[in-house]
Amino acid sequence: MINDFLLSPSFSFYEMTHTDHAEVQEKNREYGFRLQKPLGELCQKLELIRAHWGFPVVIHCGVRCKELNELVGGVPTSQHFKGEAVDFHIKNVICADVLDWFLHRCDFKWGQVIHEVKNGTPWIHFSLGEPYRLIEKCGQVLRKEEGKNYELLASGINYGR
């Protein structure tokens, strides 16, 4: 069993490796333990997001081992599988406002930001950019609602394209 520890001042290893699928929880933590570098970098970006909004960032899903990724229907190329992505919401902040901030005012680089809604529940998917993601696919902002296709809103934000 791996004990909890901080990846950044506000985010813990257990937060970033938590799953509601108890049957794979320990396996997911063991897998995530090997991904501390990207998880730490992800948490540093989450610190910037938290500092901007001034409210707690609630983690829905961070790293996913292969079994967890399959259980939740994740694609094999998911950055969650590599410890490079997180799904979250911010207390007291509408996800559409967070998306707008990434589109127009955020001043740091990222890979992908997606405002997702499934079964009426909204969240933000956020991933690391270069070197973890091809630069051509960095700075993407998308929206996906209730089973519809992804809608690309912008690409290359903060990457000079």
Image (cartoon, rainbow, N blue to C red):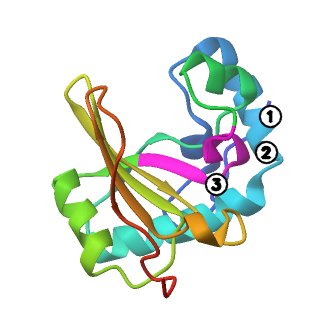
Q: Which mark is residue 30?
A: 1
Whether residues under marks 1 and 2 lie with C-beta atoms below 8 angstroms apart, the answer is yes
| Residue 57 at x, y percent in the picture | 36, 55
Q: Is residue 80 visible?
A: yes
Crowd tier of the residue under label 2, counting other residues whose Cα lies within 10 Å: few below 14, some 14–19, many 20 or above? some
Q: Residue tagged by mark 3?
A: 84
Looking at the rendering, the stretch of residues picked out in magenta corresponds to 77-87
Question: Foreground: 156 or 16?
Answer: 156
Q: Is residue 108 left or right of residue 6?
A: left
Q: Quick check: 2 above or below 129?
A: above
Q: Quick check: 47 above or below 15?
A: below
Spatial CA span between label 1 and label 3: 16 Å
Q: Nearer the viewer, mark 1 or mark 3?
A: 3
Q: Is residue 117 magenta?
A: no
Q: Is residue 81 magenta?
A: yes
Question: Foreground: 51 or 41?
Answer: 41
Helix, strand or loop at disc 1?
A: helix
Crowd tier of the residue under label 3, counting other residues whose Cα lies within 10 Å: few below 14, some 14–19, many 20 or above? many
User: Which amino acid is tagged 2?
Assistant: Phe
- For marks 2 and 3 on the same chain, the one whose residue lies earlier in the sequence: 2
